[in-house]
Amino acid sequence: MLVAYAAGELDLETAAELESHLAGCSACRLLAAEQAAVWKNLEAWEAPPIAPDFDRRLYRRIREDVHFSWWERILRPFRPMPLRQALPLTVSACLLLMAGFVIERPGKTGPVAPHRETVRVDQVERTLDDLELLGQVGMNQTESVHSHAM
């Protein structure tokens, strides 16, 4: 709304309501003043004159671009770069890449000690008892299934 106000595009009623708001709101008033300055500068700006052969050069470039493949269009900005300029860029990129590998390479570590679990005798006895109990439960279930099937 402030942009439209600065451009003079608001109707009289809306502009009056906005002006009453601007009287009490310094933030909006500042923004409106900045927008008014932008519009004033845009109105004062004069576009440079177009060269007389602008159309001819434009259509020639369009015709030339039609004959390029997509690959040539991508590489075109890099084509005028002579080797003298491309070589330092390539060397710098390679050095940065190698520095990244050297920095990220982990240092040598010592041998890893094998992990040893401590097994207690009472744990083994309880586990064996549990397995024996599960075996008996499994046999009882198998027998009950067979007796129901008959």
Image: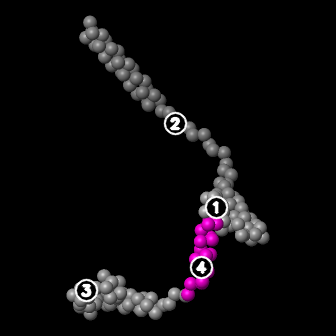
Left or right side of 98 for 54:
left
Front disc: 3 or 2: 3
Q: Please name whichever residue, 3 or 145, is drawn nearer the observer in this view of the structure.
A: 3
Instruction: Give the image location of residue 115, x and y in percent.
Output: 57, 40
Of tags 2 and 1, the one toward the viewer is 1
Sequence order check, earlier mark of 3 and 4: 3
Q: Which residue is mark 3?
A: 11
**Neighbours of disc 1 within 10 Å: few (<14), some (14-19), many (20+):** few
60 lies above or below 49: above
Majority secondary structure in the magenta region: helix
Report how far apart the C-alphas of labels 1 and 4 lie in the structure.
Answer: 21 Å
Mark 3 / mark 2, whichever is N-terminal: 3
Nearer to the camera, 46 or 134: 46
From the top left corner, tell me how far across and down residue 51 is, in percent. 60, 84
Residue at position x 31%, y 16% in the image? 141
What is the magenta range?
A: 49-65
Q: Earlier in the sequence, mark 4 or mark 2?
A: 4
Instruction: Identify the residue at horizontal 42%, vertical 92% (top origin).
Output: 40
Counting other residues with Cα less than 10 Å from the Cα at mark 2, is it few (<14), some (14-19), or many (20 or more)?
few
> What is the x, y in percent for residue 96?
68, 64
Q: Amino acid at mark 2?
A: Thr
Q: Which residue is mark 2?
A: 118
Query: Which quadrant would the N terminus be assigned to in this image?
Result: bottom left
